[in-house]
Amino acid sequence: MGAASDWKVYDEFLATIGQKVVSLNGVDQVKMALFLSTSNCGSQSLVTAQYATLTNQVANANGYATGGVVVATTWTQAGGTFTFNCANGVWNASGGSITARFAVLYDNASPNKDLICYCLLDSTPADVTATDGNSLTIQINVNGCFQGTQTS
């Protein structure tokens, strides 16, 4: 099994971030959801980067609930670098396995549930599976989900 890829920010989110009323510091509710290999979520250039446009989410069963889990978020600044980070997403497989290829972060508080970023869970690429009785934990890397640099 390969390592997970870096989080990739959706183009639409980047293009409109200056116009968005979104609080990435924990005020808005950000959720992490899981998707299958057949999903369209693995493209940064989705024409409409909204939760409703995504296909093939992991089925509502075996410890996974449609829509994913709420993750606590932070937006920090150190020097001229701003970092968006969130808590790990955790699912406990019960009654069967949970299998996924992608994780997606989205702003559940925005009217259109705008997509923020996604991650390929195994860069091989391959599915990852938590078997019955085990946990699937999506860990965020040390540099957070994404960073931006302030310029003058």
Image: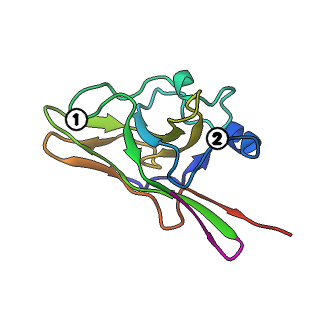
| Quarter placement of the C terminus | bottom right
Question: Where does label 1 land, which residue?
Answer: 63
At a point 50% along the width and 52% down the height, the residue shown is: 26
Percent coordinates x, y for residue 77 in the rendering = 63, 69
Q: Which residues are magenta?
A: 74-80
Label 1: element kind:
loop
- Observer-nearest residue: 130 or 138? 138
Q: Is residue 77 magenta?
A: yes
The tag earlier along the polypeptide, 2 or 1, is 2
User: Which residue sits furthest right?
Assistant: 152
Q: Quadrant of residue 48?
A: top right
At a point 42% along the width and 37% down the height, the residue shown is: 33
Magenta stretch, main secondary structure, is: strand
Percent coordinates x, y for residue 28 in the rendering = 52, 44
Percent coordinates x, y for residue 108 in the rendering = 50, 35
- Observer-nearest residue: 120 or 146? 146
Describe residue 35's horizontal placement relative to residue 152 as left or right: left
Label 2: element kind:
loop
Label 1: few (<14), some (14–19) or many (≥20) C-alpha neighbours in 10 Å: some
Describe residue 18's horizontal placement relative to residue 139 as left or right: right
Question: Where does label 2 land, which residue?
Answer: 10
User: Which residue sits furthest front?
Assistant: 27
Residue type, mark 1 in image:
Gly
Q: Quadrant of residue 20?
A: top right
